[in-house]
Amino acid sequence: MIRLLRAEEVEKLLPLSAQVNALHEAQYPDQYRGDATAEQVMCFFSERLEEGAQIFVAESVDGAVTGFLLAVPVVRDASPFLHPMRHLVLDQICVDEESRGQGIGKALVASMEEWMSQNHFQEWRSMVHSFNRHSQNLMRGQGAEVQVTRYRKMLADQAG
Protein backbone atom coordinates (compact mmCIF):
# COMPACT_ATOMS: atom_id res chain seq x y z
CA MET A 1 0.00 0.00 0.00
CA ILE A 2 1.22 3.50 -0.87
CA ARG A 3 0.08 6.49 1.18
CA LEU A 4 1.20 9.94 2.29
CA LEU A 5 3.25 10.08 5.47
CA ARG A 6 1.85 12.20 8.30
CA ALA A 7 4.15 14.67 10.08
CA GLU A 8 4.03 12.71 13.33
CA GLU A 9 5.35 9.60 11.54
CA VAL A 10 8.71 10.89 10.26
CA GLU A 11 10.56 8.55 12.64
CA LYS A 12 9.42 5.67 10.41
CA LEU A 13 11.77 6.99 7.69
CA LEU A 14 14.95 6.61 9.76
CA PRO A 15 16.02 3.09 8.66
CA LEU A 16 15.50 3.76 4.95
CA SER A 17 16.98 7.23 5.13
CA ALA A 18 20.09 5.67 6.66
CA GLN A 19 20.28 3.19 3.77
CA VAL A 20 20.10 5.85 1.06
CA ASN A 21 22.50 8.16 2.88
CA ALA A 22 25.04 5.35 3.42
CA LEU A 23 25.00 4.63 -0.31
CA HIS A 24 25.77 8.26 -1.11
CA GLU A 25 28.29 8.70 1.69
CA ALA A 26 30.22 5.64 0.47
CA GLN A 27 30.64 7.28 -2.95
CA TYR A 28 31.10 10.90 -1.86
CA PRO A 29 32.27 11.05 1.78
CA ASP A 30 33.46 14.63 1.29
CA GLN A 31 29.90 15.69 0.48
CA TYR A 32 27.57 13.36 2.38
CA ARG A 33 27.53 13.05 6.15
CA GLY A 34 27.02 9.86 8.12
CA ASP A 35 26.99 11.47 11.55
CA ALA A 36 23.51 13.06 11.63
CA THR A 37 21.46 12.19 14.69
CA ALA A 38 17.99 10.71 14.44
CA GLU A 39 16.61 14.02 15.68
CA GLN A 40 18.37 15.93 12.90
CA VAL A 41 17.05 13.57 10.24
CA MET A 42 13.52 13.74 11.61
CA CYS A 43 13.77 17.54 11.75
CA PHE A 44 14.87 17.59 8.08
CA PHE A 45 11.81 15.60 6.97
CA SER A 46 9.47 17.55 9.27
CA GLU A 47 10.71 20.84 7.80
CA ARG A 48 10.20 19.57 4.25
CA LEU A 49 6.61 18.63 5.12
CA GLU A 50 6.00 22.05 6.67
CA GLU A 51 7.31 23.65 3.46
CA GLY A 52 4.76 21.74 1.36
CA ALA A 53 6.68 18.63 0.35
CA GLN A 54 4.91 15.29 0.11
CA ILE A 55 6.38 12.04 1.42
CA PHE A 56 4.92 8.91 -0.10
CA VAL A 57 5.51 5.67 1.79
CA ALA A 58 5.10 2.06 0.77
CA GLU A 59 4.03 -0.27 3.56
CA SER A 60 3.99 -4.02 3.86
CA VAL A 61 0.92 -5.87 5.11
CA ASP A 62 2.24 -5.65 8.68
CA GLY A 63 2.70 -1.86 8.41
CA ALA A 64 6.48 -1.78 7.98
CA VAL A 65 7.75 0.99 5.69
CA THR A 66 9.42 -0.67 2.69
CA GLY A 67 10.01 2.46 0.62
CA PHE A 68 9.60 6.21 0.54
CA LEU A 69 9.69 9.07 -1.93
CA LEU A 70 10.22 12.73 -1.02
CA ALA A 71 8.59 15.06 -3.56
CA VAL A 72 9.17 18.82 -3.33
CA PRO A 73 6.89 21.20 -5.25
CA VAL A 74 8.66 24.03 -7.09
CA VAL A 75 6.71 27.05 -8.29
CA ARG A 76 8.70 29.93 -9.79
CA ASP A 77 7.76 33.09 -11.62
CA ALA A 78 9.20 33.84 -15.04
CA SER A 79 12.63 35.40 -15.30
CA PRO A 80 14.19 37.23 -18.25
CA PHE A 81 15.54 33.84 -19.36
CA LEU A 82 13.00 31.24 -18.22
CA HIS A 83 9.28 30.69 -18.46
CA PRO A 84 7.35 30.28 -15.21
CA MET A 85 7.98 26.86 -13.66
CA ARG A 86 5.66 24.53 -11.83
CA HIS A 87 7.07 21.07 -11.27
CA LEU A 88 7.88 18.52 -8.60
CA VAL A 89 11.41 17.57 -7.63
CA LEU A 90 11.73 13.90 -6.79
CA ASP A 91 14.33 14.67 -4.13
CA GLN A 92 14.78 11.27 -2.50
CA ILE A 93 13.58 7.76 -3.15
CA CYS A 94 14.54 4.59 -1.34
CA VAL A 95 13.27 1.04 -1.43
CA ASP A 96 14.42 -1.20 1.39
CA GLU A 97 17.26 -3.42 0.22
CA GLU A 98 15.28 -6.54 1.19
CA SER A 99 12.21 -5.39 -0.76
CA ARG A 100 13.76 -4.47 -4.11
CA GLY A 101 12.50 -6.02 -7.31
CA GLN A 102 8.85 -6.00 -6.20
CA GLY A 103 7.74 -2.86 -8.06
CA ILE A 104 7.76 -0.63 -4.98
CA GLY A 105 9.76 2.17 -6.62
CA LYS A 106 7.45 2.11 -9.62
CA ALA A 107 4.40 2.25 -7.33
CA LEU A 108 5.85 5.19 -5.39
CA VAL A 109 6.44 7.14 -8.61
CA ALA A 110 2.94 6.27 -9.86
CA SER A 111 1.43 7.55 -6.61
CA MET A 112 3.44 10.75 -6.90
CA GLU A 113 2.22 11.21 -10.47
CA GLU A 114 -1.39 10.66 -9.38
CA TRP A 115 -0.93 13.33 -6.68
CA MET A 116 0.62 15.62 -9.32
CA SER A 117 -2.40 15.26 -11.61
CA GLN A 118 -4.76 16.07 -8.74
CA ASN A 119 -2.69 19.16 -7.85
CA HIS A 120 -2.05 20.53 -11.36
CA PHE A 121 1.62 19.60 -11.74
CA GLN A 122 2.61 18.22 -15.13
CA GLU A 123 6.34 17.58 -14.77
CA TRP A 124 8.72 16.00 -12.30
CA ARG A 125 12.50 16.20 -12.22
CA SER A 126 15.15 14.27 -10.35
CA MET A 127 18.92 14.37 -10.05
CA VAL A 128 20.50 10.91 -9.93
CA HIS A 129 24.17 10.26 -9.30
CA SER A 130 26.10 8.36 -11.96
CA PHE A 131 26.85 5.48 -9.56
CA ASN A 132 23.18 4.90 -8.67
CA ARG A 133 22.12 2.42 -11.35
CA HIS A 134 18.96 1.36 -9.44
CA SER A 135 17.58 4.92 -9.52
CA GLN A 136 18.69 5.51 -13.11
CA ASN A 137 16.86 2.38 -14.23
CA LEU A 138 13.77 3.34 -12.24
CA MET A 139 13.68 6.84 -13.73
CA ARG A 140 14.08 5.57 -17.29
CA GLY A 141 11.50 2.86 -16.64
CA GLN A 142 8.99 5.52 -15.64
CA GLY A 143 9.54 7.41 -18.89
CA ALA A 144 11.96 10.07 -17.64
CA GLU A 145 14.73 11.15 -19.95
CA VAL A 146 18.13 12.67 -19.29
CA GLN A 147 17.82 16.44 -19.48
CA VAL A 148 21.15 17.72 -18.12
CA THR A 149 24.58 16.27 -17.54
CA ARG A 150 26.19 17.70 -14.43
CA TYR A 151 29.96 17.79 -13.99
CA ARG A 152 32.07 18.02 -10.86
CA LYS A 153 35.77 18.50 -10.28
CA MET A 154 37.53 18.60 -6.93
CA LEU A 155 40.72 20.61 -6.86
CA ALA A 156 43.72 19.18 -5.03
CA ASP A 157 44.18 20.46 -1.50
CA GLN A 158 45.96 23.81 -1.80
CA ALA A 159 46.88 24.04 1.91
CA GLY A 160 50.35 23.38 3.16
Image (cartoon, rainbow, N blue to C red):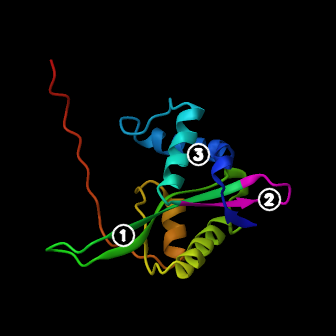
Residue under label 1: 75
User: Secondary structure under badge 2?
Assistant: loop
Disc marking residue 17:
3
Which residue is at the far top?
Answer: 160
**Where's the N terminus, which quadrant?**
bottom right
Q: Position of residue 13 (x, y in %)?
A: 64, 47
Q: Position of residue 92 (x, y in %)?
A: 51, 56
Range covered by the magenta-colored residues: 54-65
Apparent side of residue 87 relative to residue 137 in the rendered image (left or right): left
C-alpha gap between disc 3 and disc 2:
17 Å
Is residue 8 covered in magenta? Answer: no
Mark 1: amino acid: Val
From the viewer's perspective, is residue 160 above or below residue 118? above
The tag earlier along the polypeptide, 3 or 2, is: 3
From the viewer's perspective, is residue 43 above or below residue 35? below
Q: Position of residue 123 (x, y in %)?
A: 43, 77
Disc marking residue 60:
2
Q: Position of residue 153 (x, y in %)?
A: 23, 46
Residue 101 visible, this orientation: no
**Where's the C terminus, which quadrant?**
top left
Is residue 60 covered in magenta? Answer: yes
Taking the spot 57% from the left edge, 71% from the top edge, the residue there is 112
C-alpha gap between disc 1 and disc 3:
26 Å
In depth, the one of 44 and 142 nearer the eye is: 44
Specify few, some or many for label 2: CA neighbours under 10 Å numbering under 14, 14-19, or 20 or more: few
Taking the spot 32% from the left edge, 74% from the top edge, the residue there is 85
